[in-house]
Image: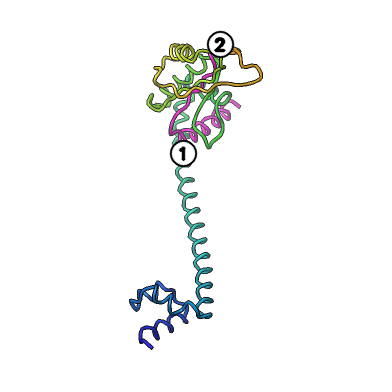
Amino acid sequence: MRNDKHLAIIMRKKGNSYKQISKELGIPKSTMHYWFKDLDWSEDIREKLTEKNRRTSRKRIRKVIKANQERWRKWRASFRKEAAKEFSKLKNNSLFVAGIMLYWGEGDGNLKNEVRLTNVDYRMVALFKRFLLNVCNISMDDIVLSLFIYPDLSEKKCKEFWSKKIKIPLIKFDKTQIIYGKHPTKRLENGICTIRIKRSRGFKEKIVVWTELLYRDFV
């Protein structure tokens, strides 16, 4: 018997993996597979090692998940802390109060999504845009508009209407969605407009804090 095969068998019986044996003795894994493929005790070791690897992998995954959760918790907490500091300076700004109240009543409160507000009244959308730009220092590059219209409405005319009223260039409009229902005819002359902010998960954390603090301040 080859001396290295004898040593490989000893190591294998001790529960070492092919990788460990190969690293220690320099024997190719394919050779060991040929040596041990018909040995019941080697198969038992393989199954035990496989189960061990599964447990180790599950532990590693849980550890990664926990670390990611903690990282996101700290990330969100940083925005909330910043929002709390800013509130005392902002709460007497009428545009700030108006923007928060608009979002509280008409915005998308789902924390998993972007900051966005949808309405048929152009004045609400225009006011919210001013709140974003002048109070929150949101860049115009991160603001996007999209429309919901009925099939018999002109997309071009609707976009021109909202663009003029909100004072936002047509290039800022995203894909228009058509409303199909039981009565797919003109109900809203200019459609429904959504204004949203890209990459706004952290900003949404701040709005949540501002809303709660404003509520407490009034109540």
The C terminus lies in quadrant: top right
Q: How is the image coloured?
A: rainbow
Of callouts 1 and 2, which one flags the residue occurring earlier in the amino acid sequence? 1
Per the image, label 2 sits on a secondary structure element best described as loop
Mark 1, secondary structure of its residue: helix
The residue depicted at 56 percent of the width and 31 percent of the height is 109
Say which residue appears at 45% left-offset and 28% top-offset: 197
Question: Is 39 part of what is drawn in magenta?
Answer: no
What crowding class fits label 2: few (fewer than 14 Cα within 10 Å), some (14-19), or many (20 or more)?
some
Rendered location of residue 18, percent (x, y): 42, 73
* Foreground of the two, 2 or 146: 2
Which dot marks residue 33?
A: none
Numbered badge on residue 81: 1
* Residue 118 location, quadrant: top right
Q: Could you tell me what secondary structure mostly forms the magenta stretch?
A: helix
Distance between the alpha carbons at the discs numbered 1 and 2: 43 Å
Q: Which residues are magenta?
A: 190-219
**181 on left or right of 33:** right
Residue under numbered circle 2:
189
* Quarter occupied by the N terminus: bottom left
